[in-house]
Amino acid sequence: MSQQSTAQPSEAQPSAAQQAAPQAEFYDRLQTFVGQEIGALQRAPDDVNVAMIRHWCDAMGDANPVYLDEDAAAASAHGGLVAPPTMLQAWIMRPYGVDRMSGGPNPYRDLTEFVESAGFTSVVASNCEQTYDRYLRPGDRLTMRTVIDSVSNEKTTALGAGHFITTRQDYFDAVGERVGTMLFRILKFRPAHEQGAVEATPQPLRPRPSLTHDQLFWFEGLQQGKLAIQKCSRCGTLRHPPGPMCRECQSLEWTTVEAAGGGSIHSFVVVHYPQIPSLEYPNQVLLVDLDEGVRVVANSIDTTYDQLVIGARVELSVQRCDDELSLPFFKVVAG
Ligand SMILES: [Zn+2]
């Protein structure tokens, strides 16, 4: 083992020589992986079928009749049964433990080993994004191709410095038309505790939310100190968590109302492990019934364990966690 002085990186990290001019070389090498195909074209073991759709809808609690009720589906805009779009990956996913690469060249493994050789040894899934070109119907038979879509240069994150690696899966029907795409992003990072003296490290930032078109308004509202509740423009039903469609009348038009801030504890958990460095423990997580009638998950604030009682009144306090993130917290109040 090499001797360590205070400024010396641990041996898992790149040497000073690797960090200087060769960083450009490292970045160039990373980009050579982009566009490479991972494994052969995958074929779905079964057609899109009603049995799997039924299991999915049962598990998800999705009662939309266009998925399973033939008459309702025939009368709908689809003209017949369709599969839930979010099942896209399920049609081709292999059972756990089945390695579709088994031997052969594997650019994804090569890329992973390359970034690990530079000290980015930890991994966390960052986000997943699906795009649908059309609805799938029973009888469709899919194939899927995976490519390395992008590799970022080094980014600083709350978990540590690292590289985002995005793979893209394109799904095709029997005649080769694309029916959907999935982007899956991971962060390969150098754990923060290996990057310097732990005691000198300020508390890392809370994890960033994965922002989508559907809930961006919610986080933006919090930045202004407001807890927004989505409201259907047609029938007035309030809903949370945010989503694109009203479950009562299927309208896609919506607006928001601001929560007054009162509510009561519907349920709670106190998390002890696993511990994320950016959160405080024991971590009190509340499921709050807002007086407006929707439920929100949030942390408590200024609340002792003894005060956590189902039914207890709580009051909203929007807190600025850092420059980019504000979140709702709830404090137990008398009454
Ligand atoms: Zn509605």
Image (spheres, grey):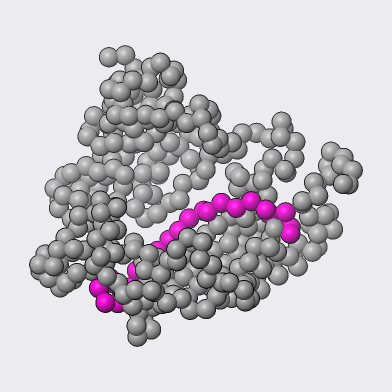
Q: Residue at x 79, y 64 (%)?
A: 22
Say if 255 sits above or below 105 in the image.
above
Question: Is 286 on the left-hand or right-hand side of 49?
Answer: right
Residue 213 appearing in the image? yes
Q: Quadrant of residue 203?
A: top right
Labels in figure, total = 0
Residue 318 appearing in the image? no
Q: Quadrant of residue 110?
A: bottom right
What is the x, y in percent for residue 259?
28, 33
Q: Residue at x 25, y 54 (%)?
A: 58
Instruction: Check residue 6 for magenta coloring.
Output: no
Q: Residue at x 16, y 49 (%)?
A: 248
Please tell me which residue lies in front, 196 or 23: 196
Quadrant of the image containing the C terminus = top left
Q: Residue furthest right?
A: 3
Question: Is 12 on the left-hand or right-hand side of 100?
Answer: right
In magenta, the rendered stretch is: 117-140
Please tell me which residue lies in front, 206 or 79: 79
Question: Is 53 on the left-hand or right-hand side of 110?
Answer: left
Say if 37 sits above or below 309 in the image.
below
What is the x, y in percent for residue 44?
39, 74
What is the x, y in percent for residue 184?
49, 62
Instruction: Check residue 136 for magenta coloring.
Output: yes
Q: Residue at x 40, y 44 (%)?
A: 220
